[in-house]
Image: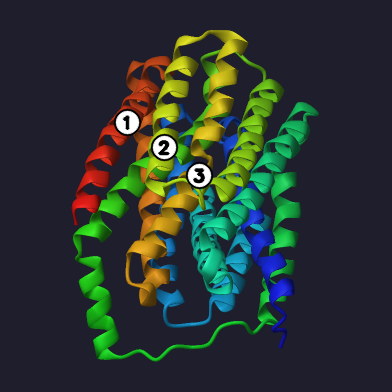
Amino acid sequence: MIKNKAYISVFTFLSLGLLGLTFAFMGASLSAMKGFFLVDIRRAGMISAILQLGFATFCMFGGILADFIRKDRILSLGTFLLGIATLLIGRSGYFGLHLLIVAVMGVGCGFLFIGSNTLVVDLFSEKRGTFLNILHFVFAVGSLVGPLIMGSILSRGQRWQIAYRYQGAISLFIAAVFVTTDVTEWRTVSKKRLVDLLWMIRGKKFFLLMITGFFAIGLQFSVMYLMVIYLQEVKGLSISYASLALSVFYILLGIGRLACSALVVRVSQWKMILVLLISLHLFLIAGWVLDGGAAALPFALTGLSCSGLMPILLSLTSSVLDSRFRGTALGFLAMCGGLGGMTITWLATALSKQIGFDRGILLVVVLALFTVLLYVVTFRAMKDE
C-alpha cells in the first residue's frame, strides 16, 4: 500500500479537478441535453437538480462516514461511481433513465467531494485554509477546461456524450489509484462519540453555518448551471461564446482562490465572505440589466465573487465546530450547498417556464441580496456566541 504524502496529495487534488470537470460539462451541455431529449426548460432544469440532489445527499453520508472509515476509500468509491455513470450517460434517449444515471453521477460527486476535502484537512491540518483554497483552485482548473472541451465538441457538430466518455475512463483510473493507498486509519464507533456528534449537529453554530452554506454555495451552483443556457436563450449569444463566458468564470474562480489562499492568513475570513457575497449580488444585477454580449462580462466576473465562498466556509466550519467530527461538519455544509444549488436552479427554471427566462432569473438576483442580509445576521449571532 502507498503511504507517500506527496503522491496521495496529487491524486486528491486531481480528484477534485475531476469534480469541477463534471459540473462544467453539465452546465455547458445542458442546452444540448434539452435538445437531445426534446424537453422544455423546466424539465431540463431537473437534470442539474437531480445531479445536485445526489451530490448533496451523499456529501452528508460521506461526511459521516469520513469520521469513521478511511477517506481514501471514500474517494475510491466516489470516482468509481462517477466513472461508471459518465460512461453510460446519453446512451439511451429515455429521459427517466437519463435522470437515474445523473443521480448516480451526483452520488459519486458527493463521495468524491467530501473525501478530497476531509483528506486535505487531515494532511494539512496546520494550514487547512490555504490548502483548501489550493484544492478548490484545482477544481476551478477542471471547471475551466470543461466548457472549452464541451463547447469545442458542440461547435463542430459532434455529440455531447463524447466528452463524458473520456471523463469516465479518467475517473476509473483515479478510483484504481486510491485502492492502492493507505493514508488514514479506521476509527472506533462508540456510543459517547455518537452522542457528541448529535450534540454538535443540534448546536446553534452548526445551524447558522449550514443555512449560510445553503444560500451562498447554492447561488454559485446556480450560476454555473444556468449561465450558458441563459446567455444563449435570453441574451442571444452563440453556444461557443456562452461557453467561453463560462470558461472565463472558471478562470476567475481559480485566480480568486489563489488570491484567497494568500489573503486568508491576513484578513478575517468572516469579512472576506461578506465582500464576496456583496460583489456577487452586484455582478448578477449587471448581468441581468445589460443586453447582448455585454451581459457575458458581469456573469463571468461572478467567478471572482464565488471563488472563496466554498473553501472559506469549509475552513470556518472545520475550525469553529468540534474537530473530531470534521467529516460530518464538512459533509453537512456541502450537502446544504448542494441542496441550495438544486433548489435555486429548479425554482428559477420552473418560474421561467411561467413568466419567461428573462424575468425568472431575477429569483437568483433577489436571493443573492437575501444571502447578504442573512450572512450579516449570522455573523453577529456567531460573534455574540
Q: Circle 3 sits on which residue?
A: 308
- The residue most toward the front is 266
Query: Which of the image's four quarters has the N terminus?
Result: bottom right
Q: Is residue 297 left or right of residue 222?
A: right
Q: In this view, does 313 lie to the left or right of 163?
A: left
Q: Is residue 54 visible?
A: no
Q: Name the N-terminal-most of marks 3 and 1.
A: 3
Question: Quadrant location of residue 351?
Answer: top left
What is the three-letter code of the residue carrying label 1?
Answer: Leu
Report the disc number at residue 367. Answer: 1
Q: Name the N-terminal-most of marks 1 and 2.
A: 2
- The residue most toward the top is 291
What is the three-letter code of the residue carrying label 3?
Answer: Gly
Crowding at label 2, few (<14), some or many (≥20) Cα neighbours within 10 Å? Answer: many
Q: Residue 364 placed where, x, y %?
A: 37, 28
Crowding at label 1, few (<14), some or many (≥20) Cα neighbours within 10 Å? Answer: some
The residue at the point 77 percent across, 32 percent down is 152
* C-beta proximity under 8 Å, tags 1 and 2: yes
Query: Which of the image's four quarters has the C terminus?
Result: bottom left
Label 1 and label 2: CA atoms lie apart by 8 Å
Crowding at label 3, few (<14), some or many (≥20) Cα neighbours within 10 Å? Answer: many
Q: Residue 71 placed where, x, y %?
A: 54, 76
The residue at the point 39 percent across, 41 percent down is 271
Label 3 and label 1: CA atoms lie apart by 19 Å
Q: Residue 375 placed where, x, y %?
A: 29, 40
Q: Circle 2 sits on which residue?
A: 219
* Element carrying mark 1: helix
Give 65 or 84, whichever is nearer the viewer.
65
